[in-house]
Amino acid sequence: MLITTDTVTEHPKGAGLASILTAGALPSTHAVVLPASRHRHILAIAEWGHLATDGLVTVWDSVAASRLADLTMVRPAVAAWVRASAGAKSMNGRQITGEINRVLLCDMPPYPLLASQPRDSWPRFLAAWTALQPWRAVTPLWAATKILSITSDTT
């Protein structure tokens, strides 16, 4: 849900919020509320310029916007690599999603994943991966940003 001084816009399952949140810091006239689980009681903790999610309210600044952009860049590569690997293992959709999430939690990308990327993109890919490390340690934030980074081809 995007709240401004004039409007409240529902974004079911966070759809469409990534483009808003990767654009830069939230202005002091905007707040985003994103339940990462079924909890719907978080509206009361919303603050201007912040992302509110289950048990956490965090300022949404340019660093957060950049990290989310990094995650939206990395996640499709992980999803494609996991799907390509899953073919030989006959995994179902839920298992594939679980594996995508497991890989994204790694401190460093597995070498076969990195090797599946164009070699000239490795420095950027590794920098993006490393930039996500602070979020991996904050469970509610990581859960919310995973939701924000999901697209139809990265679930």
Image (cartoon, rainbow, N blue to C red):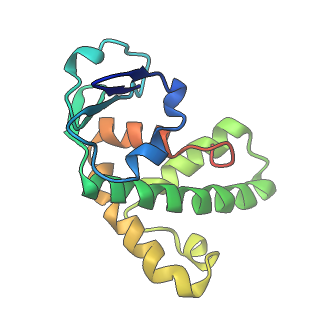
Residue 70 % position (x, y): 43, 61
- The answer to whether residue 75 is above or below residue 124 is above
Q: Residue furthest top?
A: 41
**Residue at screen point 27% across, 49% down:** 25
Residue 78 % position (x, y): 58, 59
Q: Residue furthest bottom?
A: 120
Q: Quadrant of the C terminus?
A: top right
Camera-side residue of 64 and 155: 64
Q: Quadrant of the N terminus?
A: top left
* Image mark count: 0
Residue 61 % position (x, y): 24, 50
- The answer to whether residue 113 is above or below residue 134 is below
**Residue at screen point 42% across, 53% down:** 105
Q: In the figure, residue 111 lies in which quadrant?
A: bottom right
**Residue at screen point 27% across, 25% down:** 5
Q: Is residue 92 left or right of residue 5?
A: right
- The answer to whether residue 109 is above or below residue 21 is below
Q: In the figure, residue 29 lies in which quadrant?
A: top left
Q: In the figure, residue 130 lies in which quadrant?
A: bottom left
Camera-side residue of 26 and 70: 26
Q: Residue furthest front?
A: 6
Camera-side residue of 44 and 130: 44
- The answer to whether residue 80 is above or below residue 118 is above
Residue 149 % position (x, y): 50, 46
**Residue at screen point 79% across, 48% down:** 90
